[in-house]
Amino acid sequence: MGNAAEVELFGNDDWSVQADGIEHRETGYFIARTALAMRRSEGLWDWPLQMAEKRWCRPSLFREAFLAALDRFGIPRDAELIRSFALGYGIRAVVVPAAETFVSLGDVLKPREIAAPARAPAPRTVRALAAAGA
């Protein structure tokens, strides 16, 4: 992409939709128009799942641009698209625009550090019990 003479069909703070695809304004990450409808073997849409792995990709702005591109290019949506966004970004990205602090599903599923096991209190000694009259 990168051609300033191209006409923007849709744009938001992060993404530009042009005749040949969509491009992230800051990184230059480009998704070709011909690749937008790519699916995985189970039928899920590829791009919502791929973009969920990118820390720099704000879900609400990607979703907005992706859906605008589908509309502009006449690519039909289906139930698997909703599922793809839900699996990639979580239910909030499907229902309402996600906040800046949105956590992707990939971040949620990363293993956490295991906390040190809690130590049980030492058992009372027989002498202590005898002194207490037990």
Image (cartoon, rainbow, N blue to C red):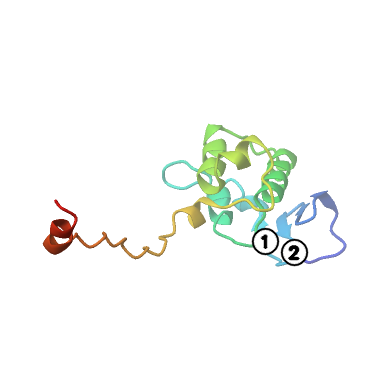
* Mark positioned earlier in the residue sequence (2 or 1): 2
SS under mark 1:
strand
| Residue at 12% across, 60% down | 126
Name the kind of residue labelled 1 in the image. Phe
Residue 38 visible in rendering? no
Q: What label does residue 62 carry, if any?
A: none
Name the kind of residue labelled 2 in the image. Met
Q: What label does residue 1 carry, if any?
A: 2
Residue that carries the numbered disc 1 in the rendered image: 30
Which of labels 2 and 1 is toward the front? 1
SS under mark 2:
loop
Q: Is residue 97 left or right of residue 55?
A: right
| Residue at 85% across, 54% down | 7
Mark 2 and mark 1 in contact? Answer it, CB < 8 Å: yes
Bin the neighbour count of mark 2 within 10 Å (Cα to Cα): few under 14, some 14-19, many 20 and up: some
Q: Position of residue 26 (x, y in %)?
A: 75, 66
Q: 20 or 59, which lies in front?
A: 59
Q: Is residue 23 left or right of residue 39?
A: right
